[in-house]
Every structure is written in C-alpha cells, then in structure tokens.
C-alpha cells in the first residue's frame, strides 16, 4: 500500500460538527503536510508539521503527529459546508525529493 | 503575485497522438514537480526539477513520458504515443526550495487529459 494512507476514505458530517482524518505512513520523514483539493482544482496547502513537532494549530485546523506510531491526524473544528473537499496528507521523506501523497479523505459537510 | 499556471486546462486527443502540457511556476520558485492524479486517487510523482541540477525522473512510468524545464521557469511535460491509461489529471507544483527544507508546494489547477 502507499505511504501516507488516509482514514477514513470518506466522511459525511453536519455543519458545525468536528471532522477528524487520520494518516499513516511508513518511512522516516522530515515533515508531514496536509492539503485540501476542491473538485476540479489543484491542491491547496493547509498546514505543515515538522518531525520534531507534536501538535500544530491554524485557525480551525489542528494537526497532531506521532512519529513513534508513524501517524498524523487532522481535526477541523466547527465544520462548514465550504470545507467540503478531499484532504490529503503528504510526507516529506528523508532521502527523497518529492512529497508522497496518500489517496485522500473525501469530506462532505451537509448544511 | 500569480500562482502556478497550467495549460491547457483540458485536452482531449486520440490514442497514439503526442501531447504537450505546460506549467508556469511561481516566479522565484526553484523547485518544480509534476504529478499525475487518476480519478479518485492520490497524487503519483512523475518528475522533479531543482535549479540547474539534473532532474529526478524516477517517477516517469515509461519512456513515452519526458519533461523539460528552461532554467527556473516554464516546464513542459510531453507524452508520446498516448494510451488510454494515460487519461488523468496532470498537476504541476512549485516551491521555494527542494523538499526536505520544510517548504510547502503550490499547485496549479492541472490539465485534465482524456485519451479517446
């Protein structure tokens, strides 16, 4: 399976609820990044967490990183319909130049 | 300033034809990446350019795929003798420096390639 696997593959919630997405990876990393992709568009960078960091916040986003378990989570609080998109984690692997992306979580926020 | 620009946004062509996809990175970004995204899938790395260094072509799926970059500007991805399996969205990204120094990548909206 691919490095950077997201879980769940799809998530449907009501507006105002929190959404949690998880990502697992296999190798050593320099950092882990989360991206959002709206339908038919490119990816937009959301947040980057370095390998020596454990938690990071940006607005309604909270990212955690557990390098011992090789996993990360993205929490979106108080979700909005506009948060509907696919979310990808990407690892910046040591010894490799390009990011390695997972297959993404499709989030649907119902108004 | 302008973001990453890709053209064309959509391309439909017949099997066996050659196609050329273009990417204009953000000015000043030394690193440029090409990815392929099949429907409902994640991104698959194709090729990476960093300044004047030799490109990392390790992700190119076959010798029908090639890419060039002029200095730190425009890049073109060429697919020769296209096959139906080449149908996908081809995404270009640029960043200030190579991956490994904690820089995020900035993506264009991609070229949606359909092979009939």
Image (cartoon, coloured by chain):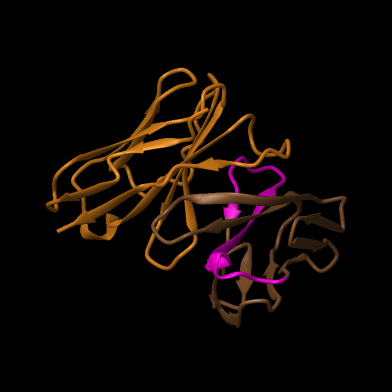
Chain colours: A brown, B orange
Total labels: the figure holds 0
* Residue B107 location (% of width, % of height): 50, 43
Residue under the point 64% across and 30% down: B97
* Residue A106 location (% of width, % of height): 53, 72
Q: Above or below — where is B4 with respect to B11?
A: above
**Residue B69 visible in image:** yes
**Residue placed most toward the observer, B50 or A15:** A15
Asked if residue B65 lies in the magenta stretch, the reply is: no
Residue under the point 73% across and 40% down: B102
Q: Quadrant of the C terminus of chain A?
A: bottom right
**Residue A104 visible in image:** no
Q: Above or below — where is A105 with respect to A95?
A: below
Query: Position of B63 compared to A76: left or right?
Result: left
* Residue A66 location (% of width, % of height): 83, 64
Query: Position of A25 compared to A11: left or right?
Result: right
Residue under the point 41% across and 52% down: B36
Query: Position of A51 compared to B60: left or right?
Result: right
**Residue placed most toward the observer, A76 or B73:** A76
Query: Position of A88 compared to A41: left or right?
Result: right
Residue under the point 78% across and 62% down: A62
Q: Quadrant of the N terminus of chain A?
A: bottom right
Where does the magenta region start and end? A78-100
* Residue A87 location (% of width, % of height): 58, 63
**Residue placed most toward the observer, B64 or B113:** B113
Query: Residue A104 sits in which quadrant?
Result: bottom right
Asked if residue A79 lies in the magenta stretch, the reply is: yes
**Residue placed most toward the observer, B92 or A79:** A79
Query: Residue A80 sits in which quadrant?
Result: bottom right
């Amino acid at each position: 399976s691919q490095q950077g696997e997201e879980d769940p593959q799809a998530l449907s919630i009501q507006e105002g609820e929190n959404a949690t997405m998880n990502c697992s990876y296999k190798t050593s990393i320099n950092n882990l990044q989360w991206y959002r992709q709206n339908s038919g568009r490119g990816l937009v960078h959301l947040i980057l967490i370095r390998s020596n960091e454990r938690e990071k916040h940006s607005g309604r986003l909270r990212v955690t990183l557990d390098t011992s378990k090789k996993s990360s989570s993205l929490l979106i609080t108080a979700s909005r319909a506009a948060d509907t998109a696919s979310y990808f984690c990407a690892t910046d692997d040591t010894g490799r130049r390009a990011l390695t992306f997972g297959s993404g979580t499709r989030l649907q926020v119902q108004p | 300033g302008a973001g990453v620009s890709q053209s064309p946004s959509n391309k439909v062509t017949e099997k066996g034809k050659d196609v050329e996809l273009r990417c204009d990175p953000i000015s000043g970004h030394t690193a440029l990446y090409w990815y392929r995204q099949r429907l409902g899938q994640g991104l698959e790395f194709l090729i990476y350019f960093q300044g004047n260094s030799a490109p990392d072509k390790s992700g190119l799926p076959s010798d029908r795929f090639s890419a060039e970059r002029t200095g730190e500007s425009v890049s073109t991805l060429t697919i020769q003798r296209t096959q139906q399996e080449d149908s996908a969205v081809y995404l270009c990204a640029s960043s200030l420096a190579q991956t490994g120094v904690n820089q995020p990548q900035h993506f264009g909206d991609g070229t949606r390639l359909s092979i009939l």
